[in-house]
Image (cartoon, coloured by chain):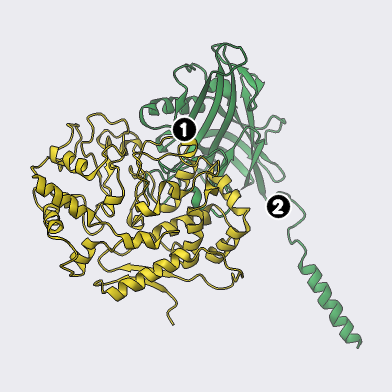
Amino acid sequence: MKLKYFVAALALATFMTSCEDDTPSQNPSTTTSEVPVILHYDFKYGTTDFALNQEFTSDSGYTIRYTLATFYLAKPVIMDDAGNSTALDPEYYIIRPDVMMSNMGTIEAGHAHMFNLSIGVDAETNTETGGNGMQPTDFSDVNHPLAPQPEGMYWSWASGYIFVKIEGEIDYEGDGTYDQTFKYHLGTDPFRKDRSTMLHTSVEKGDTLNITMTVDYQQFLHGIDLHSEILTMSMGDARPLAEKMMNQFDAATSFELGSDHGHKK
Amino acid sequence: MDTKSKIELGAFPIAKIMVAMGMLFFLAQACQPDTELNIQSEPSPVLISINHFPEMPLEEGKELTEEAIAAGKSLFFDPILSRNRDLSCSSCHLTQLAFSDGRAVAIGTEGRLHNRNSPTLFNVAWQPYLFMDGGNPTLESQVIGPIEEHREMDLPYSEAIARVAAVDYYQELFQRAFKEDVNPKTLALALATYERALVSFNSAFDRYEYAGDASALSPGQKRGLALFKSAELNCVACHVLPLTTDFSFQNNGLYEVYEDPGRARVTNNIPEHEGQFKVATLRNIALTGPYMHDGSLGSLEEVVDHYASGGSNHRLKSSLITGFSISAQEKADLISFLEALTDTTSYKAYMP
């Protein structure tokens, strides 16, 4: 009889413990030589913090506000000084102004020489006019960055992802009424921007490799005629403007080692 | 026991046609909600095999099943996919017009005018790329187009998913069809599967040409068919039988200056692609007017006149568009033949 109770108790204990989370309580980086990589975002309008629907003054003195500023980052890689690459995970990130940082997985402790990634979606995945790439309708997981997004980051009619989608409004007279919209939907493979940032730093067990991406949305519109250069979907006659605006975005973007919290690594 | 539903037409014996039509009717009814849900059972495969057509291209994971067709059909006729819930896919793809709409250009939510004509959806399963400019590679991913397009349903696809996922009836249909919830993949797959099942193969021309029924065409239609195939008119150079299209992109000389750049829109303005549009199917052509990418030609008479004239002198006009002489009788015969491409049995089977 006692044996019966013992077996029952053992079974109960086994059942209960089998439901426990097996995840170690400690951060893996503290128990292994893996170092987390975090990309921080710093969105600015000149020297002030940037936010959607906030009024700013353009270089021409117009009141403007951004209503949308979303972009893709893809395939971040850390290279050591021997040229070995560590592909970071996840591979794709959709970034909006309210995103503070992205956890980009881990690398082995050691020397981090270079940080590479693309602004946009890589050509293998971005299926413009055919091929074996991905479309939003390939994803069951609505949370995947390449799944359908509320702001529509995919051109179904051209079968490609929109790399950078920026929209806003312009008040030319400063009378509180917005007179014009601007819309820059930037994409297609030739316009993707591959960026490389020299890190040249060593990271040890217990460190975090912090990198900061800054986007200056004043710089993005610097030199742009807000009367004539206000609309492009990267196709047709507006394609040259898309190329120009993608270059503007690239120029408005910078990467540097560290974060504004003062940690260099 | 073979559990596949099979639509297979060989040499068009009437009995086989009836079986096929019966199956189509069954598919048309399949979206009616059941009172009991049994998602344990496997979806029932449907095989559409038409002997005088090329094999339907089907990638793995996109097989036709009764359940997937039913889920897609429900969505196709449901205005849930438009921003204002005022349009469904069927608003621009009317069953009785062979899934076209009879308008020059489509009219979207709030009366917004599109710049292109609504094409028939029959036999879309054989299309190697979608849209008139070929900008989309799959039926699944093209689903996003009309749902999100400002001049069509104007609803973010992500919101469409949320809407449909909130309906228990759809969740049940999708579990039956895919053993998954409503999500970006399954919603597109449902609509695409329904559209793949829209097949048209039983016109008088089919019965004459492929089933040996000499009486299926009138004498005038037979003369029209001969003209259609003739070296002088050479319609078959692009309208290749039996699908009546080779899916190539052609500038047919409709304009000297194109407002719609056609294929150049999606190929980063490659100049040679200006004014090129995918060759349209002629099946059910009598039901799908007005014609051309912008619906600018209102009748088949105007279409024949256009090709007989040789079209406008666009610098990139296809070398195949050279013009031809045609008498009034020949023109009537040719149009009579085009009318013989109508397949009323197919579209009636798909009536909601």
Which one is in front, A194 or B277?
B277
Circle 1 is placed at which residue position? Answer: A186
Q: Is residue B216 among the parts visible in the rendering?
A: yes
Which residue reaches farthest bottom? A1
Which one is in front, B194 or B285?
B285
> Quarter of the image containing the N terminus of chain B?
bottom left
* Chain letter of the residue beneath label 1 in the structure image: A
Q: Position of residue B186 (x, y in %)?
A: 52, 57
Q: Secondary structure at mark 1?
A: strand
Q: For the residue carrying disc 1, how many other residues have a C-alpha within 10 Å: few (<14), some (14-19), or many (20+)?
A: many
> Which chain is tinted green?
A
- Give left or right: position of A89 versus B294: right
The amino acid marked with disc number 1 is: Leu
Q: Which mark is residue B287?
A: none
Residue at image point 47% right, 65% down: B29
* Mark 1 vs mark 2, CA separation in Å: 39 Å
* Chain letter of the residue beneath label 2 in the structure image: A
Q: Can you say whether B8 is above or below A245 in the image?
A: below
The amino acid marked with disc number 2 is: Pro
Q: Secondary structure at mark 2?
A: helix
Chain-order first, disc 1 or disc 2: 2
Q: Position of residue A178 (x, y in %)?
A: 57, 19
> Which chain is tinted yellow?
B
Q: Can you say whether B281 is above or below B68 in the image?
A: above
Q: Position of residue B123 (x, y in %)?
A: 33, 57
Q: For the residue carrying disc 2, how many other residues have a C-alpha within 10 Å: few (<14), some (14-19), or many (20+)?
A: some
Circle 2 is placed at which residue position? Answer: A28
- Give left or right: position of B210 versus A130: left
